[in-house]
Amino acid sequence: MPKYLLILRDDPADFAKMSPAEMQACIEKYIAWSKALGAKGHMVGGEKLDLPGTVLSRKKGDVIRQDGPFGETKEIVGGYYLIRADSLQHAAELCSDHPQLENGTVEIRPIDTFGAPDAD
């Protein structure tokens, strides 16, 4: 079954406004969603990402390291999941009730195995 990367984007300021009780309720929604998807055999893994991060690039042969994400960026990648689904449409259906959609977006990207059979 093909794999799909779910990229969770949001504005961290939205979460900073939450009370501890609201934040706990939000976390519980994510845990419940993950467990439900896992019970159906679609969850491969996922994690919440922390800040700050580092961005690497190469210019004229030198590796440049910059802190990121940058302050002018409103949305950041706050986490990811790796799931299995029959198709991109199926992956979208599986994510239609994701709690991330209350405060942000979920980008769904097919994993390209370069024609190699899926080992997992």
Image: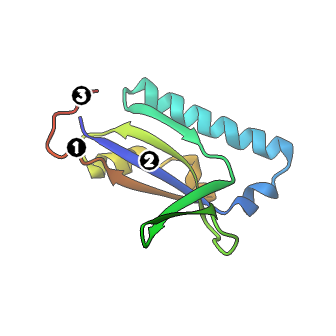
Q: Nearer the viewer, residue 86 or 10?
A: 10
Q: CA distance from mark 1 to mark 2?
A: 22 Å
The quadrant of the picture occupied by the N terminus is top left
Tag 2 residue: 95
- Which mark is first along the chain, 2 or 1? 2
* Residue 90, position as x, y percentages in the image: 30, 46
Query: Residue 112's x, y, as percent?
Result: 24, 48
Task: Classify 53 as above or below 36.
Answer: below
User: What amino acid type is highlighted by mark number 3?
Assistant: Ala
- Residue nearest the viewer, comparing 24 with 115: 115
User: Who comes first in sequence, dot 2 or dot 3?
Assistant: 2
Q: Nearer the viewer, mark 2 or mark 3?
A: 3
Q: Which residue is mark 1?
A: 113
Instruction: Give the label on residue 119, or none.
Output: 3
Give the alpha-carbon distance from disc 2 to disc 3, as whole Å.
24 Å
**Crowdedness near tag 1: few (<14), some (14–19) or many (≥20) residues, C-alpha within 10 Å:** few
Who's the residue at 28% across and 51% down the image? 88
Amino acid found under the numbered disc labelled 2: Cys
> In which quadrant will I find the C terminus?
top left
Q: CA distance from mark 3 to mark 1?
A: 10 Å
Q: Residue 47 sits in which quadrant?
A: top right
Residue 48 percent across, percent down from the top left: 60, 42
Which residue lies at the image location 79% right of the left edge and 46% below the top edge?
Answer: 22
Q: Of 111 and 35, which appears nearest the observer? A: 111
Label 2 Cα neighbours within 10 Å, binned few <14 / some 14-19 / many ≥20: some
**Mark earlier in primary sequence (3, 1):** 1
Query: Which element type, helix, strand or loop, lies under badge 1?
Result: loop
User: Of all residues shown, which one is farthest toward the left?
Assistant: 115
- Is disc 2 placed on a helix, strand or loop? helix
**In the image, residue 101 lies at what x, y percent?**
56, 56
